[in-house]
């Protein structure tokens, strides 16, 4: 559509950022809530592909509403990439064994959200929106509750 690589990369990054915002949304919780009832059930960690495909239609229309015709595809693609990164990260945090300090920290952060501080720490791929919305658990709370 006549955009440079840098412009397309920027659109994709905006889409990923948009997804990280959606992953903290109440509507997302309603769709993902069953996982909170059964957080160790491996069959409930990722959204079923057929349902995800159906939800792509309203997500596409939302993106189309807030972007220009030439940027819609890039932003939508970034949102899908953000979703796939979220699903893979979320599954790994439950079933993987991170070997790096950042990975272990993210796993602890997410499991604290499930089992200790359910009203804080909603971000999976990023803590950005927890900072913005004031839902970042305090380090003191995380340490106290982990003990």
Image (cartoon, helix red, strand yellow):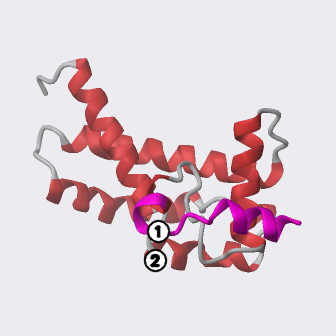
- The answer to whether residue 83 is magenta is no
- Crowd tier of the residue under label 2, counting other residues whose Cα lies within 10 Å: few below 14, some 14–19, many 20 or above: few
Q: Which residue is mark 1?
A: 134
Which percent across, then down, holds residue 127? 53, 53
Residue closer to the observer: 39 or 111:
111
Q: Earlier in the sequence, mark 2 or mark 1?
A: 2
Give the residue displayed 63% in from the left and 64% down from the top: 138
- The answer to whether residue 136 is magenta is yes
Relative height, residue 73 to residue 55 (above, below): above
On screen, residue 132 versus residue 122, left or right, reads: left
Residue closer to the observer: 66 or 127:
127
- What is the CA distance from the residue labelled 2 to the residue labelled 1? 15 Å
On screen, residue 51 versus residue 21, left or right, reads: right
Query: Pointer 2 and pointer 1: residues touching (CB < 8 Å)?
Result: no
Relative height, residue 142 to residue 71 (above, below): below
Task: Tell me where residue 14 sits by quadrant.
Answer: top left
Which percent across, then down, holds residue 132? 40, 61
Question: Which residues are the magenta region?
Answer: 131-147
Which percent across, then down, holds residue 140? 71, 64
* Furthest residue in direction right, as rendered: 147
Q: Quick check: can you spot residue 131?
A: yes
Relative height, residue 64 to residue 72 (above, below): below
Which percent across, then down, holds residue 112? 74, 65
Give the residue displayed 15% in from the left and 24% down from the top: 3
Q: Which residue is mark 2?
A: 26
Give the residue displayed 49% in from the left and 62% down from the top: 130
């Amino acid at each position: 559509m006549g955009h440079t690589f840098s412009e397309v990369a920027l659109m994709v990054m905006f889409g990923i950022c948009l997804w990280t915002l959606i992953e903290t949304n109440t509507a997302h919780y309603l769709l993902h809530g069953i996982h909170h009832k059964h957080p160790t059930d491996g069959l409930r960690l990722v959204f079923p592909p057929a349902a995800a495909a159906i939800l792509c239609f309203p997500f596409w229309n939302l993106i189309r509403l807030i972007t220009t015709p030439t940027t819609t595809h890039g932003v939508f693609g970034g949102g899908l990439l953000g979703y796939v990164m979220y699903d893979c990260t979320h599954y790994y945090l439950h079933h993987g064994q991170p070997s790096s300090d950042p990975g272990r920290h993210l796993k602890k952060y997410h499991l604290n959200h499930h089992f200790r501080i359910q009203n804080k720490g909603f971000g999976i791929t990023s803590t950005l929106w927890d900072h913005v919305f004031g839902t970042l658990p305090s380090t003191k709370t995380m340490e106290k509750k982990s003990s």
